[in-house]
Amino acid sequence: MDSQNTTNTNTEAKMLLSHAKTFRLHTGNLVNRSRLKKKCPGSPSEELRDCIQASLSEWISTTKLSSKDLTDTLEFSIPEATDAITPEEREELKVSVKLFLHESGQSSIKDAVEMACQTLAVSQLDSVIIAPPGPSDGDSQSLAHLQPAWEELEALVRSKQIAAIGTSDLDKDLLEQLYKWAQIKPSSNQVNLASCCVMPPDLTAFAKEFDIQLLTHNDPKELISADTFQEAVRAGAQDLNIGDWRLEWVLRYNVIVKSRGIIKSKGYLVSAKKTST
């Protein structure tokens, strides 16, 4: 791209980003993106940061931008990097999702699930694990803190957009409280083995009694900080002055071939809102 075209592209990108109030970003299938495959991220946080930066940069440099397309919601995606699931192969695949909420609000959950279904061309996600935002002011997580998000997940199960729902990092007492209260019970609970090298015996016993699958993960409590997210956006936008953006949610999906246990595709969906000025 010559310097004149680069200048025009940057001007159009800045105009679109300056006008938008929300942006939705899809990294595409990371399994097929050689540019990102060459890197070996040291953590999920580094992987997400690199994905945001690379996807935004690639979108600006490859997409035909036009100020005629001004919209309040801007979508960044690389079409050729997306692997939609065909109806013929759907039964052979399991679509698993983990949703990291950075702000409270049930609408975020519905928006994220609908975007995942649309992106992957499926009507239902096989499983969704929720990671709600941490309690404010250093309070510990409570049932009251979990209930609004869980009720929205239950509604999405009833509407058949999700088959099974699960939790992340609940101890035995909180998992038991949620199980007794919930109308649709959690099918799984993720445990971070960085914080406990061995599954707590009381959690293991409770999960076994009530048929809750215990899974392990290595995600940090905060998948990406506000500052790191802002830095990734600015770097991906090639230092254009596009304002400040506030992260709403991050959804990570894995599409697994059931019979072989291999990952067919993996990616992130990200939603952010412009900070009020």
Image: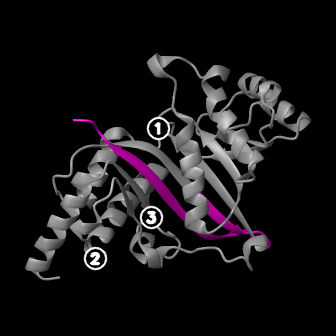
How many residues crowd mark 3 within 10 Å: few (<14), some (14–19), many (20+)?
Answer: many
Tell me if residue 259 is in the magenta stretch.
Answer: yes
Q: Quadrant of the C terminus?
A: top left
**Residue 258 position (above or below residue 244):** below
**Residue 39 position (above or below residue 71):** below
Q: Quadrant of the N terminus?
A: bottom left
Amino acid type assigned to the residue bearing label 1 in the image: His
Residue 118 placement, left or right of 155 = left
Which residue has dot 2 on it? 64
| Spatial separation of the CA atoms under disc 1 and disc 3 | 19 Å
The residue drawn where x is 74% and y is 47% is 157
- Residue mark closest to the camera, 1 vs 2: 2
Q: Find the magenta span and give its range.
A: 253-277
CB of mark 1 within 8 Å of CB of mark 3? Answer: no
Instruction: State the residue in front, 264 or 105.
Output: 105
SS of the residue at dot 3?
loop
Q: Label the magenta part by its dominant secondary structure.
A: strand
The residue drawn where x is 68% and y is 31% is 170
Which residue has dot 1 on it? 102
